[in-house]
Image (cartoon, rainbow, N blue to C red):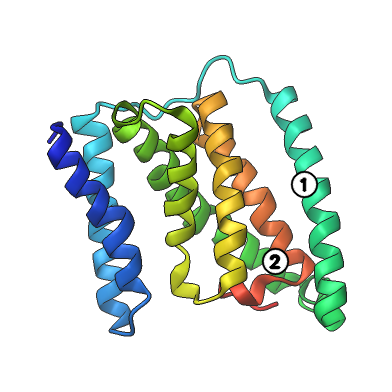
Amino acid sequence: MNTTIYKGIEFLIIFILLPVSFAIDYSIKLKMGIGIIGFIYIIYVLLWVEEKQFKMAPNLKWCIFWKQTIFKLAVIAILTTLFVWLTDSKLLFDILINKPKLWLFILFVYSFFSVYPQEIIYRTFYFQRYKGLFKNEVLFIFVNAIIFSLGHIFFKNSLVVVLTFFGGVLFAITYKNTQSTLLVSLEHAVYGCWLFTVGMGGMLGFPA
Protein backbone atom coordinates (compact mmCIF):
# COMPACT_ATOMS: atom_id res chain seq x y z
CA MET A 1 0.00 0.00 0.00
CA ASN A 2 3.00 2.31 0.18
CA THR A 3 4.30 1.91 -3.36
CA THR A 4 4.22 4.90 -5.70
CA ILE A 5 1.92 3.09 -8.14
CA TYR A 6 -0.56 2.16 -5.41
CA LYS A 7 -0.60 5.71 -4.06
CA GLY A 8 -1.08 7.09 -7.56
CA ILE A 9 -4.11 4.87 -8.20
CA GLU A 10 -5.44 5.65 -4.72
CA PHE A 11 -5.09 9.39 -5.37
CA LEU A 12 -6.87 9.10 -8.72
CA ILE A 13 -9.82 7.24 -7.20
CA ILE A 14 -10.24 9.31 -4.03
CA PHE A 15 -9.55 12.80 -5.31
CA ILE A 16 -10.54 12.65 -8.99
CA LEU A 17 -12.94 9.86 -9.87
CA LEU A 18 -15.11 9.96 -6.74
CA PRO A 19 -15.68 13.76 -6.73
CA VAL A 20 -16.48 13.70 -10.44
CA SER A 21 -18.90 10.80 -9.94
CA PHE A 22 -20.70 12.74 -7.19
CA ALA A 23 -21.50 15.45 -9.75
CA ILE A 24 -23.43 12.87 -11.81
CA ASP A 25 -27.09 12.29 -11.04
CA TYR A 26 -27.67 8.97 -9.31
CA SER A 27 -28.96 7.71 -5.96
CA ILE A 28 -28.02 9.97 -3.04
CA LYS A 29 -28.00 6.89 -0.81
CA LEU A 30 -25.40 5.26 -3.03
CA LYS A 31 -23.31 8.43 -2.98
CA MET A 32 -23.47 8.54 0.81
CA GLY A 33 -22.52 4.87 1.02
CA ILE A 34 -19.51 5.38 -1.25
CA GLY A 35 -18.49 8.45 0.73
CA ILE A 36 -18.68 6.63 4.07
CA ILE A 37 -16.68 3.66 2.75
CA GLY A 38 -14.08 6.05 1.35
CA PHE A 39 -13.80 7.91 4.66
CA ILE A 40 -13.40 4.66 6.59
CA TYR A 41 -10.63 3.65 4.18
CA ILE A 42 -8.86 7.00 4.73
CA ILE A 43 -9.02 6.64 8.51
CA TYR A 44 -7.70 3.08 8.23
CA VAL A 45 -4.76 4.19 6.10
CA LEU A 46 -3.95 7.09 8.42
CA LEU A 47 -4.04 5.04 11.61
CA TRP A 48 -2.71 1.65 10.56
CA VAL A 49 -0.70 2.21 7.38
CA GLU A 50 0.76 5.68 7.94
CA GLU A 51 0.54 5.26 11.74
CA LYS A 52 -0.68 8.83 12.15
CA GLN A 53 -1.62 9.81 15.69
CA PHE A 54 -4.37 12.37 16.19
CA LYS A 55 -2.90 14.39 19.02
CA MET A 56 -2.94 18.08 19.74
CA ALA A 57 0.51 19.40 18.89
CA PRO A 58 2.26 20.56 22.09
CA ASN A 59 3.56 23.82 20.67
CA LEU A 60 0.54 25.31 18.95
CA LYS A 61 1.01 29.05 18.48
CA TRP A 62 -2.55 30.11 19.20
CA CYS A 63 -1.88 33.84 19.32
CA ILE A 64 -0.20 33.90 15.90
CA PHE A 65 -2.87 31.63 14.44
CA TRP A 66 -5.77 33.80 15.59
CA LYS A 67 -4.10 37.05 14.51
CA GLN A 68 -3.57 35.67 11.01
CA THR A 69 -7.04 34.11 10.84
CA ILE A 70 -8.82 37.26 12.02
CA PHE A 71 -6.90 39.37 9.51
CA LYS A 72 -7.82 37.03 6.65
CA LEU A 73 -11.41 36.88 7.89
CA ALA A 74 -11.60 40.70 7.83
CA VAL A 75 -10.53 40.74 4.18
CA ILE A 76 -12.98 37.93 3.32
CA ALA A 77 -15.78 39.68 5.24
CA ILE A 78 -15.34 42.94 3.34
CA LEU A 79 -15.25 41.26 -0.07
CA THR A 80 -18.17 38.89 0.54
CA THR A 81 -20.35 41.56 2.14
CA LEU A 82 -19.85 43.77 -0.90
CA PHE A 83 -20.58 40.82 -3.19
CA VAL A 84 -23.88 39.92 -1.52
CA TRP A 85 -24.92 43.57 -1.24
CA LEU A 86 -24.28 44.14 -4.95
CA THR A 87 -25.76 40.88 -6.24
CA ASP A 88 -28.76 40.33 -3.95
CA SER A 89 -28.94 42.67 -0.96
CA LYS A 90 -32.04 40.90 0.42
CA LEU A 91 -29.82 37.96 1.40
CA LEU A 92 -27.38 40.06 3.41
CA PHE A 93 -27.39 38.61 6.96
CA ASP A 94 -30.94 37.39 6.29
CA ILE A 95 -30.69 34.04 8.10
CA LEU A 96 -28.87 35.57 11.09
CA ILE A 97 -31.57 38.20 11.53
CA ASN A 98 -34.70 36.22 10.67
CA LYS A 99 -33.80 32.64 11.60
CA PRO A 100 -31.15 32.76 14.35
CA LYS A 101 -31.92 29.23 15.63
CA LEU A 102 -31.52 27.78 12.14
CA TRP A 103 -28.33 29.80 11.76
CA LEU A 104 -26.85 28.29 14.93
CA PHE A 105 -27.93 24.79 13.86
CA ILE A 106 -26.27 25.21 10.45
CA LEU A 107 -23.02 26.44 12.01
CA PHE A 108 -22.94 23.45 14.37
CA VAL A 109 -23.68 20.83 11.70
CA TYR A 110 -21.31 22.40 9.19
CA SER A 111 -18.39 22.76 11.61
CA PHE A 112 -18.51 19.26 13.09
CA PHE A 113 -19.91 17.10 10.30
CA SER A 114 -18.51 18.82 7.22
CA VAL A 115 -15.40 20.84 8.05
CA TYR A 116 -13.54 18.37 10.26
CA PRO A 117 -13.98 15.35 7.95
CA GLN A 118 -12.91 17.51 5.00
CA GLU A 119 -9.73 18.56 6.78
CA ILE A 120 -8.91 14.96 7.67
CA ILE A 121 -9.28 14.01 4.00
CA TYR A 122 -7.84 17.01 2.18
CA ARG A 123 -5.12 18.12 4.57
CA THR A 124 -4.20 15.41 7.11
CA PHE A 125 -4.50 12.45 4.74
CA TYR A 126 -3.19 14.28 1.68
CA PHE A 127 -0.12 15.71 3.43
CA GLN A 128 0.67 12.49 5.29
CA ARG A 129 0.19 10.23 2.29
CA TYR A 130 1.47 12.14 -0.76
CA LYS A 131 4.05 14.68 0.39
CA GLY A 132 6.88 12.32 -0.57
CA LEU A 133 5.59 12.16 -4.15
CA PHE A 134 6.14 15.89 -4.75
CA LYS A 135 9.55 17.53 -4.91
CA ASN A 136 8.09 21.01 -5.40
CA GLU A 137 6.24 22.36 -2.35
CA VAL A 138 4.38 25.03 -4.33
CA LEU A 139 3.09 22.38 -6.74
CA PHE A 140 2.10 20.20 -3.77
CA ILE A 141 -0.04 23.01 -2.33
CA PHE A 142 -1.43 23.95 -5.76
CA VAL A 143 -2.57 20.36 -6.38
CA ASN A 144 -4.17 20.30 -2.93
CA ALA A 145 -6.17 23.43 -3.78
CA ILE A 146 -7.21 21.95 -7.13
CA ILE A 147 -8.51 18.70 -5.66
CA PHE A 148 -10.23 20.55 -2.82
CA SER A 149 -12.00 22.66 -5.41
CA LEU A 150 -12.81 19.56 -7.46
CA GLY A 151 -14.35 18.02 -4.35
CA HIS A 152 -17.04 20.72 -4.50
CA ILE A 153 -18.07 20.43 -8.16
CA PHE A 154 -21.21 18.52 -7.14
CA PHE A 155 -22.63 21.93 -6.17
CA LYS A 156 -22.47 22.77 -9.89
CA ASN A 157 -21.62 26.38 -9.13
CA SER A 158 -18.59 28.07 -10.67
CA LEU A 159 -18.28 30.56 -7.80
CA VAL A 160 -18.07 27.70 -5.29
CA VAL A 161 -15.28 26.13 -7.36
CA VAL A 162 -13.32 29.40 -7.38
CA LEU A 163 -13.84 30.10 -3.67
CA THR A 164 -12.86 26.58 -2.63
CA PHE A 165 -9.70 26.79 -4.73
CA PHE A 166 -8.53 29.89 -2.87
CA GLY A 167 -9.74 28.38 0.38
CA GLY A 168 -7.74 25.28 -0.42
CA VAL A 169 -4.60 27.36 -0.82
CA LEU A 170 -5.15 29.07 2.55
CA PHE A 171 -5.91 25.81 4.36
CA ALA A 172 -2.96 23.98 2.81
CA ILE A 173 -0.57 26.74 3.90
CA THR A 174 -2.02 26.72 7.40
CA TYR A 175 -1.66 22.96 7.68
CA LYS A 176 1.89 23.07 6.28
CA ASN A 177 2.85 25.66 8.90
CA THR A 178 1.05 24.13 11.88
CA GLN A 179 0.73 20.40 11.09
CA SER A 180 -2.51 20.65 13.07
CA THR A 181 -5.85 19.23 11.93
CA LEU A 182 -7.47 21.16 14.77
CA LEU A 183 -6.17 24.57 13.73
CA VAL A 184 -6.89 24.17 10.03
CA SER A 185 -10.38 22.91 10.89
CA LEU A 186 -10.98 25.99 13.05
CA GLU A 187 -9.84 28.28 10.25
CA HIS A 188 -12.00 26.44 7.72
CA ALA A 189 -15.01 26.62 10.05
CA VAL A 190 -14.54 30.34 10.67
CA TYR A 191 -14.54 31.24 6.97
CA GLY A 192 -17.31 28.81 6.08
CA CYS A 193 -19.55 29.97 8.91
CA TRP A 194 -19.02 33.54 7.79
CA LEU A 195 -20.28 32.67 4.29
CA PHE A 196 -23.49 31.27 5.78
CA THR A 197 -23.81 34.32 8.02
CA VAL A 198 -23.34 36.93 5.30
CA GLY A 199 -25.93 35.27 3.05
CA MET A 200 -23.97 32.96 0.73
CA GLY A 201 -25.18 29.70 2.26
CA GLY A 202 -27.56 28.89 -0.57
CA MET A 203 -24.77 28.08 -3.01
CA LEU A 204 -23.29 25.67 -0.44
CA GLY A 205 -26.47 23.70 0.04
CA PHE A 206 -27.71 25.55 3.13
CA PRO A 207 -30.44 28.19 3.42
CA ALA A 208 -29.19 31.65 2.62
Residue indicated by mark 1: 73
Query: Residue reaching furthest top?
Result: 59
Q: For the residues marked 2 and 1, what is the alpha-carbon distance in whole angstroms?
A: 13 Å
Q: Give the percent coordinates (x, y) of residue 128.
A: 34, 31
Q: Give the percent coordinates (x, y) of residue 135.
A: 36, 25
Task: Give the amino acid type for the residue marked by disc 2 in the picture.
Answer: Phe
* Position of 37 relative to 60 (above/below): below
Task: Give the amino acid type for the residue marked by disc 1 in the picture.
Answer: Leu
Residue indicated by mark 2: 196
Q: Give the percent coordinates (x, y) of residue 66.
A: 74, 32
What residue is rendered at 55% in x and 25% in y? 178
Look at discs 2 and 1 and give the one toward the viewer. Answer: 1
Dot 2 crowding, Cα within 10 Å, few <14, some 14–19, many 20+: many
Kindly tell me whether residue 197 is visible in this rendering: yes
What residue is rendered at 68% in x and 73% in y? 102
* Numbered disc 2: secondary structure: helix
Q: Is residue 74 left or right of residue 147?
A: right
Quadrant of the snapshot with the N terminus: top left
Closer to us: 111 or 3: 3
Kindly tell me whether residue 97 is visible in this rendering: no
Q: How many marks?
A: 2
Q: Is residue 37 left or right of residue 111?
A: left
Image quadrant of residue 86?
bottom right
